[in-house]
Image: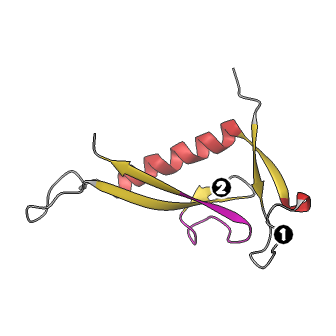
């Protein structure tokens, strides 16, 4: 069953100081945002295929990635498909279990 909930993103130019201005509010469907984030994370795993292999005796224990979400619900590294105007940033931290 589809999720009818929405999450608010306040979009607009970076020079705007009224961060929570009602005119900048965009309601994004949770399902769409979840799918876009899952697609981004799957692509990220493909980018780092050798992360499990220690190099020179040192292995990767954790990794932090800053991810942009724009007013259209697009997810990605800023400058790689996510439009710059009006984006929010999440920091995802992955740690070995």
Q: Residue furthest right?
A: 23
Which of the two discs, 1 and 2, sits closer to the camera?
1
Q: Residue at x 8, y 61 (%)?
A: 57
> With respect to residue 34, does 50 lie above or below?
below
Q: Residue at x 38, y 49 (%)?
A: 94
> With respect to residue 20, does 95 lie above or below?
above
Q: Residue at x 78, y 79 (%)?
A: 15
Q: Nearer the viewer, residue 67 or 45?
A: 67
Tags 1 and 2 touching, CB below 8 Å: no
How many residues crowd around disc 1 within 10 Å: few (fewer than 14), some, or many (20 or more)? Answer: few
Please provide the residue range marked out in magenta: 77-90
Numbered circle sitting on residue 18: 1
**Residue 78 forms part of the magenta stretch:** yes
Q: Main secondary structure of the magenta part?
A: loop
**Residue 45 forms part of the magenta stretch:** no
Q: Position of residue 66 (x, y in %)?
A: 50, 62
- Residue 56's image quarter? bottom left
- Residue 50's image quarter? bottom left
Q: Secondary structure at mark 2?
A: loop
- Residue 19's image quarter? bottom right
Q: Nearer the viewer, residue 96 or 70?
A: 96
How many residues crowd around disc 2 within 10 Å: few (fewer than 14), some, or many (20 or more)? Answer: some
Numbered circle sitting on residue 74: 2
Q: Residue at x 14, y 57 (%)?
A: 54
Q: Nearer the viewer, residue 5 or 49?
A: 5
């Amino acid at each position: 069953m589809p999720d009818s909930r929405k999450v608010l993103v306040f979009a607009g130019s970076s020079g705007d100081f009224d961060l929570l201005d009602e005119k900048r509010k965009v309601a994004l469907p949770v399902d769409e945002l979840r799918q876009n984030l899952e697609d981004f994370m799957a692509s990220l795993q493909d980018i780092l295929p050798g992360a499990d292999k220690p190099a020179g005796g040192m292995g990767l224990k954790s990794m932090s990635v800053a991810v942009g979400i724009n007013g259209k619900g697009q997810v990605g590294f800023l400058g790689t498909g996510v439009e710059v105007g009006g984006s929010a940033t999440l920091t995802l931290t992955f740690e070995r279990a």
